[in-house]
Amino acid sequence: MAAVQRLILSALNCKRPNPRCSYVAPTYRQAKDVAWEYVKTFAGPVATEIHESELRVTLLNGARVRVYGAENFDALRGVYHDDVVLDEYADMAPSVWPMIIRPALSDRLGKALFIGTPKGRNLFYQVYDAAGGDADWTRIMLRASETRLLPEAELEAARRDLTPEAYAQEYECSFDAAIMGAYFGKEVAEIERLGQITEVAAEPTLPIHTAWDLGIGDSMAIWAFQVHGTQIRVIGHYEASGYGFDHYVKECAARGWVGGDDFVPHDAKVRELGTGRSRVEVLIGMKRKPRLVPDHKVDDGISAARITLPRCWFDAERCRDGLEALRQYRTDYDEKTRAFKNTPKHDWTSHTADAFRYLAMAWRVLAPEPPKPLPKSIVVGGESSMDLDDMWKYAAAPVAARY
């Protein structure tokens, strides 16, 4: 509420022509649910137009205040801002601020306000931490125990109802509380403690492999890695949206991610109705070397990723956004059943996490182990009773034998 009021006052007091002020939440629906009614209520007395379909109001001085969702962050490109509120920044893709919002403030010398609930020492924490040593920024932490906005009896009831970690996060603004429902939070924190998130240069004598999550009209994520014995050197990560295969192939080539295998999900063999070609065939035509990761349950892939992470060494800079996605990848809490759901939450972390799942299911076929025969349980083109180890053996089979 206070952030919306601040945004409207900023729009009214802006001296530049055609002011544009924006409220951005992680998703469009969330932005509409959280902020839109407040915008209409507080802007109503000074508004000349209210545009329901665009979640936008026009004020007496011609300024516009608009509500956005950050899930399709490319839609925010090319829009200038005089003031922006980024609500729950911890749930947004890491590139939203540095690649989209920050440049859009420059020519207007605009302002930004980050608000949200701490969810571990993520990018939101980094912004908060950096603000403490920068005279151009102000930071405020509003702990329930200090603001006294809630009665002590309510706080005591919350302490009884919530876990200590949940209470510390939601009421006391703790950045150190674990992210509830996170799949890989502990594993990433442990390898960071052990110094395995550092500078990792590509080894010239080893091929560079990639693991792809192939989106359709959505984001596509790629991990680049090398395998040395049972050690996995993750040297890069890339994600974008709204592009064709040629873009990603060019990006891989520009980064030197060539020569190795490209591990892709099993459904990449399916031919598209429009072109009659599979995505495997498209990649082969672009001189890439796709290999199908065997079909598997998401739970098995997540288990494989948990087993794989302790073997990984990540380049801290080139994998920064990817690591943040792995930290944030999680399931939701079901209030009705009072338990975490059995499926991952689909948000900006999903594609990167899925690509890492394919990496985890595939890397063993690259380790220097003697070849083993395919298990008899495999039925090409039909059902399979493979377990996780069988899947890894199966992935070593020639691509032509699998579709």
Image (cartoon, rainbow, N blue to C red):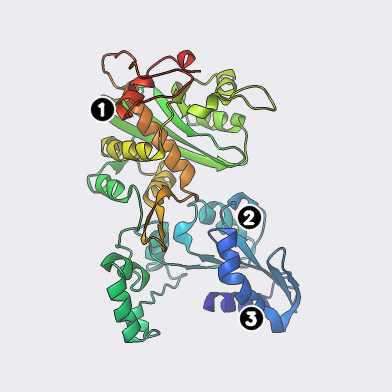
Residue at left 46%, top 13%? Answer: 401
Q: Amino acid at mark 3?
A: Phe
Q: Are marks 3 and 1 in contact (CB under 8 Å)?
A: no
Q: Amino acid at mark 1?
A: Thr
Residue at left 39%, top 19%? Answer: 378
**Left or right of residue 198, residue 70 in this image:** right
Q: Position of residue 191 (x, y in %)?
A: 26, 44
Residue at left 32%, top 29%? Answer: 388
- Whether residue 201 is visible to the viewer of this picture, yes or no, is no
Q: Nearer the viewer, mark 3 or mark 2?
A: 3
Q: Which mark is residue 42?
A: 3
* Sequence order check, earlier mark of 3 and 2: 3
Q: CA distance from mark 3 to mark 2?
A: 24 Å
Q: Position of residue 208 (x, y in %)?
A: 40, 25
**Left or right of residue 139, residue 1 in this image:** right
Q: Position of residue 131 (x, y in %)?
A: 41, 67
**Left or right of residue 373, residue 24 in this image:** right
Residue at left 33%, top 64%? Answer: 175
Nearer to me, 178 or 85: 178
Q: CA distance from mark 2 to mark 1?
A: 42 Å
Nearer to me, 76 or 366: 366
Q: Which mark is residue 230?
A: 1
Q: Which mark is residue 76?
A: 2
Q: Nearer the viewer, mark 2 or mark 1?
A: 1
